[in-house]
Amino acid sequence: MTPLATPFLPLEGNAPPTFGVGSFDSRPLFPSAAWTHGDTAHYAWTDIWVTNHILQAVIGAALVIGFWLWVSHNMKIVPGRKQYVGEYLYDMLRNTVARDILGHDYKTYLPYIVSIFSFVLINNLFGQFFLFMFPTFSKIGFAWGLALLTWLLYNGAGIKKWGLFSYLKRMTVPAGVPVALLPLIIPLEILSNFIVRPITLGLRLFANLFAGHLVVLVFVLGGTYLMFVSEPIINKVAGGAAMILAFAIFALELLVAVLQAYIFTVLTAQYVSSAIAEEH
Amino acid sequence: MTLLEMSGSLNMVGYGLATIGPGVGVAMIFSAVINGTARQPEARSSLLSTAWIGFAVVEALAIIGIALAFVLTGTLTK
């Protein structure tokens, strides 16, 4: 058995691998000695909250803040190259997402839309980027965090505009529904507007990135295994083909990364728009 | 004699079947966009922005499917 085979073998009490399927496990940056008390193991808070994936998300946030500060710094009437790129990206989000969906008072929500798009996009691109090679949102906790932010935003926007009870009435009682149908419609609307929306928003982002990263792992690790570990020559050929196909999968993942960032942003705008719409 | 022994969860087969519906749905959405664009090319951008929202809603079914495939780990026993 070659040394390359070791990552594919069942572990024998060693530390889990930090690549392959093991890349989904967060590793503490400053591991402390876990101590046991009775049957439960206790960890320091740094083991749970200061991990490589948290660091990755923080770097993503810092890059987003840095990028927008950089392109908006020292702006001129005749834009230079740097300002042109920034204005192009900003205008794209402003015109095709915010203004088209949110209507005339889109400017209130524009900062949130621009920052959520940049943050999701850069974290998705980390899946293809060396140093990280892991899309942050294939850990579901990050996706829940963003979904919760959007949930708070659209409910907050609706409550601020209409007041609590008027907003709840607008969201749960559609106009023009016969009274006899209301006992059926109201629970459905509550389920759809307050529960299914944030859940699918978070799950969609998570599942796309998770499945994408898993497919990449299958092709790359499976290809490596077939080429270097298994014996028959036909397997080695198949392994080489899998490694080449992995590039196509990476290209697909680039598309998915941009698409999911766009869809998350569009749906956020859509939910806010439905919460503050005059009539629906 | 055991001819072929497989292990794993049948959930994944179920999830594969469950993707047929959203797959057909997404195909219908984008075929409608292509039709609409062919008939009226200048309406492409407004068609597409609606299509992405429709795509997200239909895709939610597949997403719920993959979540349930991982969550519901009931075992089939003889």
Image (spheres, rainbow, N blue to C red):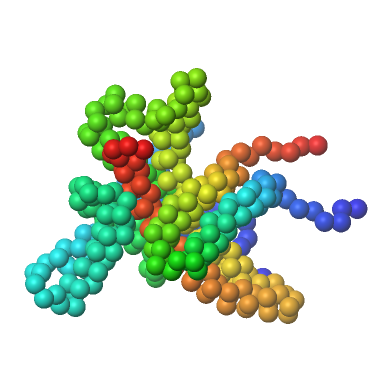
Q: Quadrant of residue A96?
A: bottom left
Q: Is residue A33 visible?
A: no
Q: Is residue A189 visible?
A: yes
Residue plotted at (31% across, 44% down): A273
Residue furthest right as drawn: B1
Q: Would residue B30 appear left or right of A271 to someone viewing this image?
A: right
Question: A125 or A238: nearer the eye?
Answer: A125
In percent of width and height, residue A37 lies at 43, 32
In percent of width and height, residue A223 lies at 61, 71
Q: Quadrant of the C terminus of chain A?
A: top left
Residue plotted at (91% across, 53% down): B1
Residue furthest front as drawn: B39
Q: Would residue A204 appear left or right of A1 to someone viewing this image?
A: left
Where is A80 relative to A34, above or below? below
In percent of width and height, residue B44 lies at 42, 65
Where is A72 relative to B14, above or below? below
Q: Quadrant of the N terminus of chain A?
A: bottom right
In percent of width and height, residue A84 lies at 20, 73
Residue plotted at (48% across, 30% down): A188
Question: B66 or A213: nearer the eye?
Answer: B66
Question: A46 or A69: nearer the eye?
Answer: A69
Q: Would residue A146 appear left or right of B19 to someone viewing this image?
A: left
